Image: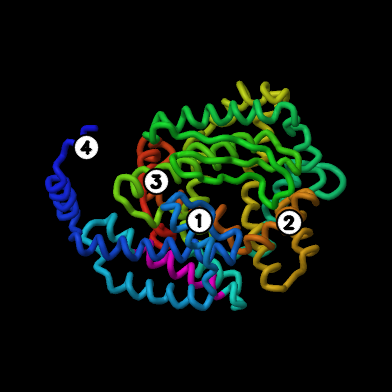
């Protein structure tokens, strides 16, 4: 190997020179690396108390074995977390932007870990307090009248007798993908999403993912990142899957969403820089707002303007055995329904604060988010499991859009939009640093 021909002393000198050029001394890097190791081990330790907490891990196997072998008490995790937060605050932040982002990232991730520990110990936070503590963001609040104005427009779009939600659901049933066509349609969508992504972003060699179809989940799709630039994507088939979910899931979970996000972090921060903190992904942390926000906004980046409807009319609708003449009207309706996305936040906010019970939360979703009854019940189960995590999808998407546009990535400048999007995917940026 070419690298092996370098003398050890020369290799060290090169590494130190690179650190000096980046404005970081070897002692500073060692300090941050030590903090990063402590952080990873704390995340793994908390995962022994919270089955949903560790979303991905591909760091040293011995660290995971150590965590599995010894269940550290929550009090000890809390104490160690506070000590590491103090260590981060005392450590020099570095002279470059990326080093400073690393410093801020570790402090906020550790603070969120501490908040999650307190929640597991019984501390009760309001919906907004919880989202701020865990995700470094507070989503806007909307009154019912805000959603009613959108519903009034939908009433005119889908006239008829009976509840609006039932009328919308009846209309959308024409666009369900048959179970025997689902994998073919999904694979076709993945292929297109990947082609559009690699045209603009350089992905690590050998990156890939596999797809599984599962049931009995509170979510519709999930990316389980495996490390080594590989993912397992699971698609929940409990409920009917509409044609729009093919592109949504292919982009969100795959290209240029979660799979690309994790692969680029592994390539640029773990392998190129040796930042071990990115070998673990704690779900209830600020990282999730960036992950979900980029995954949702990535759909628009990959399919700007009318390109999505054009592709689906030509390719996906025929592949699903659906009448392509209905594509334009279907997506006009979807654009209006998308404006109701924050209704889900309001249902969660009221439900988790104790203002309404599960049945009332489901009814709120049926009325203001136009969810079918079974889908509304599934969403309430999601609230039970993931709580204020719901803000990461819509508010995260809005924050990411503002960040991309503030860096020149407007709809009429697709190249700049992809560039800013790729930079965001590859950096440890925090939600609180994004434009409001």
Of the numbered discs in the image, which one, if any, rests on residue 266? 3
**Secondary structure found at label 2:** helix
Q: Is residue 245 visible?
A: yes
Q: Quadrant of the N terminus?
A: top left
Identify the secondary structure beneath mark 4: helix
Residue in the image at 59% along x and 76% along y: 121
Of the numbered discs 4 and 3, the one sitting upstream in the chain is 4
**Where in the figure is residue 270, as x and y percent of width and height?**
35, 49
Per the picture, the main secondary structure of the magenta-coloured stretch is helix
Q: Nearer the viewer, residue 258 or 76?
A: 76
Label at residue 3: 4
The circle drawn on residue 288 is 1
> In the rendered image, which quarter is residue 385 located in?
bottom right
- Asked if marks 3 and 1 touch (Cβ < 8 Å), the reply is no
Please tell me whether mark 3 sits on a helix, a strand or a loop.
Answer: helix
Who is closer to the viewer here, 31 or 98?
31
- Mark 4 to mark 3: distance in Å? 20 Å
What residue is rendered at 72% in x and 23% in y? Answer: 321
Which quadrant of the rendered structure holds the C terminus? bottom left
* Circles 4 and 2: CB atoms closer than 8 Å: no
The residue tagged 2 is 365
Image coloring type: rainbow
């Amino acid at each position: 190997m070419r690298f092996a021909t370098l003398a050890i002393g020369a290799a060290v000198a090169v590494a130190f020179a690179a650190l000096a050029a980046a404005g970081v001394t070897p002692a500073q890097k060692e300090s941050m690396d030590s903090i990063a190791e402590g952080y990873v081990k704390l995340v793994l330790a908390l995962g022994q108390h919270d089955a949903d907490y560790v979303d991905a891990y591909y760091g040293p196997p011995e660290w995971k074995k150590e965590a599995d072998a010894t269940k550290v008490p929550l009090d000890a995790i809390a104490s160690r977390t506070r000590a590491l937060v103090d260590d981060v605050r005392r450590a020099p932040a570095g002279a470059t932007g990326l080093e400073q982002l690393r410093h801020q990232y570790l402090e906020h991730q550790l603070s969120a870990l501490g908040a999650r520990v307190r929640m597991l110990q019984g501390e009760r936070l309001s919906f907004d307090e919880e989202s701020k503590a865990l995700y470094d963001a507070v989503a806007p609040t909307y009154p019912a009248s805000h959603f009613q104005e959108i519903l009034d427009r939908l009433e005119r779009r889908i006239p008829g007798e009976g509840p609006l939600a039932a009328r919308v659901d009846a209309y959308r049933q024409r666009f369900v993908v048959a179970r025997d066509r689902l994998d073919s349609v999904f694979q076709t969508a993945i292929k297109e999403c990947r082609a559009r992504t690699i045209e603009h972003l350089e992905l690590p060699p050998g990156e890939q993912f596999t797809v599984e179809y599962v049931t009995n989940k509170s979510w519709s799709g999930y990316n389980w990142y495996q490390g080594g630039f590989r993912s397992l994507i699971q698609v929940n088939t409990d409920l009917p899957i509409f044609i729009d979910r093919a592109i949504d899931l292919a982009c969100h979970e795959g290209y240029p969403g979660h799979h690309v996000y994790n692969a680029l972090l592994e390539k640029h921060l773990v392998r190129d820089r040796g930042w071990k903190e990115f070998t673990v992904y704690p779900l209830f942390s600020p990282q999730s707002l960036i992950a979900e926000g980029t995954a949702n906004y990535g759909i628009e980046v990959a399919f700007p303007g009318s390109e999505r409807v054009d592709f689906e009319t030509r390719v996906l609708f025929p592949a699903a055995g659906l009448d392509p003449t209905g594509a334009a009207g279907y997506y006009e309706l979807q654009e209006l329904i998308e404006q109701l996305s924050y209704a889900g936040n309001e249902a969660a906010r009221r439900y988790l604060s104790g203002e309404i019970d599960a049945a009332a939360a489901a009814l709120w979703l049926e009325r203001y988010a136009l969810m079918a009854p079974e889908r509304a019940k599934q969403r309430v189960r999601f609230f039970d499991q993931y709580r204020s995590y719901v803000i990461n999808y819509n508010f995260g998407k809005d924050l990411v859009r503002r960040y991309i546009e503030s860096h020149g990535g407007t709809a009429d400048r697709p190249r700049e939009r992809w560039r800013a999007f790729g930079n965001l995917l590859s950096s440890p940026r925090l939600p609180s640093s994004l434009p409001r």
